[in-house]
Amino acid sequence: MKRCDIVEMFNEKDMVKVCAPMVRYSKLPFRMLVREYDTDVCFTPMIMSDSFVQSEKARDNEFKTCEDDRPLIVQFAANNVEDFLKAAELVAPYADGVDLNCGCPQRWAMKEGYGSSLLKKPELIRDIVLRTRNTLPSPFSVSVKIRILDDLSETLSLCQSLEAAGVSFLTVHARTPLQRRQPPNYEALQLLCSSLNIPVVANGDLHSLQIAQDIASDTGCKGVMTARGILENPALYAGFATTPVECVQRWFSLCLSLGSSFSCFHRHLSLMTGSSSVGVGNVNPGIIKNPMDRRFLNCLTTYPAVIDFFSREDIFGKEFLPLFQP
Ligand SMILES: Cc1cc2nc3c(=O)[nH]c(=O)nc-3n(C[C@H](O)[C@H](O)[C@H](O)COP(=O)(O)O)c2cc1C
């Protein structure tokens, strides 16, 4: 397997378009879907490195990929060097890089020393990066996804220490661990971008290609990452304002050919048609406008029932069928 050189990609492209790590969502069929719509790099959902290292069952459950699922970065939650390093070694033959989650603000993660609680232990993050970088030969990216700290100079010195340790790039969700729906702090992002020599990927509220391009030119970031935006419109990076019909058709086909639980297939379908949302309210206008239709779709429990629903004349019409590519 030939590895993609993620660092080289940042040199070659004006703006690298990234699909975010998303627990329960950024799994293989969804990654393959967004790749068809101009996504350059995909992240897996966050995987717990300790159980991944210890259990074959966890590995089978948490990590599925295929030859065309590239470039791929596997994101791990870790609270020590050994777990992250061993997990990275296990996935290295099948991926182009690994990423350390230093952004998850959930209470359970903070309590166990994962996610954004790591931001209080900059030496540990640095050691994880340093050991992994020194063990796994390039091209293989070792990256970190962070949130910003209340103290911007502290954030900058963390980033600079990671740069010195050899981190390949950083993703910055431009909110602090305590912030939820406050507007992202793009000024802080701009300062980080202008002070670092490694690529920075901007994250937070980039809900359209135009917004992503504007933020890239305002901040000088080398890449953009979207989570909720791309869930609600997997064709976002290709410039579509809402999910096109053929994208929904491709979603059916990819789930059928690559394998997906019905609940995962259905969850995504609700999001990409505007029938449900992650968090508070939809960020993009949905393609199914009638609230009754949205509720009806959300209650369906089988693939044939869903195909019947979309084939209705007032939805997509009789020609709606899963779209298999030659
Ligand atoms: C459903 C969902 C699952 C997420 N899972 C992860 C994850 O596994 N790892 C991670 O670093 N961030 C995770 N996040 C956070 C996103 O990657 C991203 O940082 C955040 O949603 C802000 O970006 P957005 O405004 O584009 O949604 C998740 C977000 C959502 C909505």
Image: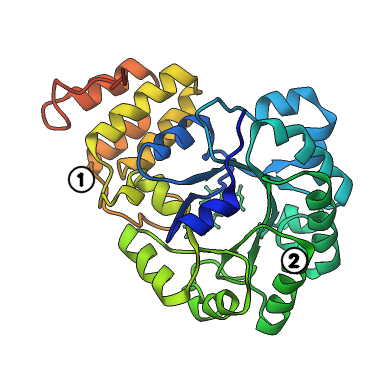
Q: Hey, which quadrant is residue 7 in on the image?
A: bottom right
Q: Which of marks 2 and 1 is nearer the N terminus?
A: 2
Q: Is residue 120 above or below residue 133?
A: below
Q: Is residue 224 above or below residue 27?
A: below
Q: How crowded is mark 2: few (under 14 residues within 10 Å), some or many (20 or more)?
A: many
Decide if residue 228 is on the left or right side of residue 81. Answer: left
Q: Tell me which amino acid carries mark 1.
A: Lys
> Which quarter of the rendering shows the C terminus?
top left
Q: Tell me which amino acid carries mark 2.
A: Leu
Identify which residue is drawn at 17% across, 32% down: 315
Give SS at disc 1: loop
Q: In this view, does 220 lie above or below 86?
A: below
Percent coordinates x, y for residue 220 in the rendering: 47, 73
Residue with the mark numbered 2: 162
Residue with the mark numbered 1: 289
The one of 248 and 240 positioned closer to us in this rendering: 240
Percent coordinates x, y for residue 283 in the rendering: 35, 57
Identify which residue is drawn at 51% across, 23% down: 261
Q: Nearer the viewer, mark 2 or mark 1?
A: 2
